[in-house]
Amino acid sequence: MANRFRGYLPVVVDVETAGFNAKTDALLEVAAVLVTMDKDGKLVLGKTLHANVEPFVGANLDQEALKFNGIDPYHPFRFAKSEQEALGEIFKPIRQAIKEAGCKRAILVGHNATFDLGFMNAAAERCKIKRNPFHPFSTFDTVSLCGLVYGQTVLAKAAKAAGMDWDHDAAHSASYDAEQTARLFCLITNLWQEHTPNFVKHIPDQK
């Protein structure tokens, strides 16, 4: 894995939020899917990490955003955690996976990845987390990959074009969207490897 992506470990992330501004709007839900490599060099989905998040003090809650994702930020059965606790629980296994894979850092994979990374970075900054495992600005974006391979940029349409099932009732939960995005990322990467085997053979050793 360390050689395949120049020392970076792909981790697929999806966030649900109370708006579009990472600095002012609440982060409400985070899911991260660890990506691993099987004995044949194919990417496969690993463990899914998930946390519901309490709005930070003073956070803006856009009602249109809440209506869209169907989240009640203060519902007691969300069992939401503070940003500090939620990110701690998400980041710890990611750091361990980076170490086990022999990588130097994680790289965020997302559908419109800069959106997810922006909220993750803003939350980490609010919590004064010094060891954010993600590269601060580089990403892999499945919008571009799906547009190239399937001619679709909407996640649901891209999944269907790739022959995947899509559950509209489960969509817009961070875990479901992250896992579907991870499946697309692995599928596209593996297809590339199957059709360009010499490319993978000539990746220089990063160790």
Image (cartoon, rainbow, N blue to C red):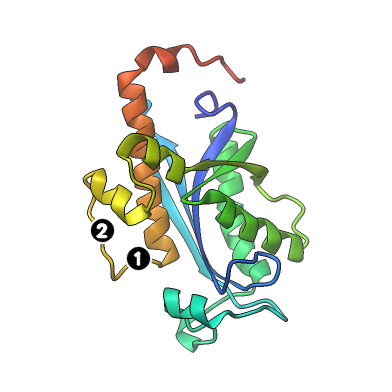
Q: Which mark is residue 89?
A: none
Measured from the top left, where is residue 6 in percent x and y? Answer: 58, 26
Q: Is the residue 77 above or below the residue 23 in the image?
A: below
Q: Is the residue 107 above or below the residue 102 in the image?
A: below
Which residue is at a point 64% across and 72% down the rendered structure image? 25
Task: Return the residue nearer the eye: 63 or 100.
Answer: 63
The kind of residue tagged 2 is Trp
> Where, quadrant-wise, is the C terminus in this rendering?
top right
Question: Which residue is labeled 2 in the image?
Answer: 166
Measured from the top left, where is residue 104 in percent x and y? Answer: 65, 34
Question: Which residue is labeled 1 in the image?
Answer: 171
Query: Residue 77 sits in which quadrant?
Result: bottom left
The residue tagged with tag 1: helix, strand or loop? loop
Which residue is at a point 56% across and 74% down the rendered structure image? 18
The kind of residue tagged 1 is Ala
The residue tagged with tag 2: helix, strand or loop? loop
The answer to whether one can see residue 41 in this image is yes
Measured from the top left, where is residue 29 in percent x and y? Answer: 52, 68
